[in-house]
Every structure is written in structure tokens, then in C-alpha cells.
Amino acid sequence: MQLHLKEWAELPSTLLSIENEEDRKEVTEKLIAQHPQIGGMLDSLQWMRKWTKTQDEQDPANPYKHFPPEKDYHRILHLLWEREPVLFVEKSRTMMTSWWAVAECTHFVETHPPALGIFIAQDQDRAVKCIDYARVLWDQQDEWLKRAYPLARPLDQQMFTTLEWANGAQLLALPGKDPDKIRGYHPWVIFFDEAAFIDRFAETYLAALFTKAKKILAVTTAHPGDFRDMTRTWVEEPVPRKWLSPASASIR
């Protein structure tokens, strides 16, 4: 199979046309077996572990590192990410879970234009931190991947709240304090970082549901509030009634 880089870059979107998930997975695995390098485009976990690097701010002598393959919980989270349209994760601060979540979002958006991903956190500074993670992941990926998925403008010329690709893909940072901020967008994925610390998280989550996002991902360290209450009642009632207003009753 001889393809130019541009054609390789379009494969992730092309594979989505295979409606049966098992068939799509089988084709993907065969392609990666025949061309291992293409795993950087078709498999986000491979991309994290082999084709890009995170930034370790506690190790200035060797700051850029692949995701550690011995951390098996990243594999488990990856499998859940692929399967679940809504995923809430409680974490400790040493698990690199925010890096993992940003990487999943960045890889999908980059390889499936013109997808939009939205990062929401307690305030704008914390949401922009997720954009900073995405910038590192783009910049630290192998050069052939940067050629396959070039940015719309160089990193130093991008707005601090966004990351935009030449193919139309985009990541956007929003503060979580105002649930109305998300209305009007049509993202493929919404990621809530440190969700338990977001004021009015339940309202913002309901607003996120109305965007029709294909994926909603929230990670957080433990903290009292909406996130904790929602996860404790999730099995019995995914959207607790006390958070439903008459305008949102149609989601039931």
C-alpha cells in the first residue's frame, strides 16, 4: 500500500466511514501491523507512548518524556475513552490523568478535521493550561506527524486560548464559571479538568449535553460538590433530577 503523507493523514477520518465498530477496529489493526508507523495516526495510546512527549516540569534536565508504558491505567482509561460517550474519572495528582485526557482530545481533533475540542476548567488560566499541554504534545510529536498535521499558524502566533490546525481542527479553552459560555459551539469533545472545583459544574455539564458533543470527559481530584454528588448517583440516575430545569427536561 503506497500512499502519500497527505493520504495517510486522511485515513483516520476515512476509517470512520466503516460503521461497524468491530470491522473498523479490525481494519485499523491490520493497517498498523502492516505499517507500524501509522499507529501514530490511528491509535492515540501508541501516539502518546511512541510518537509524542509530555513535559515534566519537575525534571528540567530532561523535561520531555513519552507517556510511561508501565502505567497500565492509561491503557484502561484509553479503552474506556474509546467505549464511553461520557466518562468521569477521579484521580490523584500523580497519575498524569490531565495529560492523558488532553492527549486523547488533541490526537482525535488533530486527526479528524474539522473537529472542535473544548477544554473547561475552574477559570481561564487553568483552561489555558490544557491548551499549553496540547501545544507541547503537538510540538513534541515526530516531525513527520507535524508535517501531516501542520498548524494554521506557528505556535508563537496562535491566540493563547486556542490551538488551530491548517486542516480546520481546533482546541478552545473556556472558563467553567459561566455555563452559557459553551452554548453556540458544536464540539466533538468537551473536557472538564478538575471538574469538582468548577463552580456550577452541574449546570455547565447540562449545557455541554445540549451541544450534542460525541464525547464528554471529566477528570478531577476528590472534592465536595456537584461532581462528587453526580458520581455517587450516576448508576441510578445519570442526570439527577435536582439539576433539571424545565428547559432541560427534554434530555431525559
Image: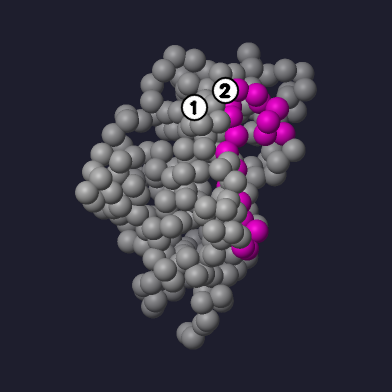
Residue at 23% x, 43% y is 59
What label does residue 9 carry, if any?
none
In the rendered image of this protein, does residue 65 appear above or below residue 242? Answer: below
What label does residue 195 carry, if any?
1
Q: Residue furthest front?
A: 156
Q: Residues within 10 Å of mark 1 (few under 14, many from 20)?
A: many
Residue 187 placement (x, y as % from top left): 65, 45
Residue at 52% x, 52% y is 156
Q: Decide whether residue 170 is among the magenta residues.
A: yes
Instruction: Name the foreground residue: 182 vs 69.
Output: 182
Residue at 49% x, 86% y is 2
> Which image quarter holds the C terminus?
top right
Mark pair 1, 2: CA separation: 7 Å
In the rendered image of this protein, does residue 249 appear above or below residue 77? Answer: above
The reply to whether the C-beta atoms of the residues labelled 1 and 2 are less than 8 Å apart is: yes
What label does residue 201 carry, if any?
2
Residue 219 placement (x, y as % from top left): 44, 32
Residue 97 placement (x, y as % from top left): 37, 38
Locate residue 28 relative to residue 186 in the image: left or right: left
Q: Earlier in the sequence, mark 1 or mark 2?
A: 1
Residue 117 seen in the current view: no
Q: Residue furthest right?
A: 247
Q: Which residues are magenta?
A: 166-183
Residue at 35% x, 30% y is 91
Residue 161 placement (x, y as % from top left): 58, 41
Q: In the rendered image, which quarter is residue 39 located in?
A: bottom left
Q: Secondary structure at mark 2?
A: helix
| Amino acid tagged 2 | Phe
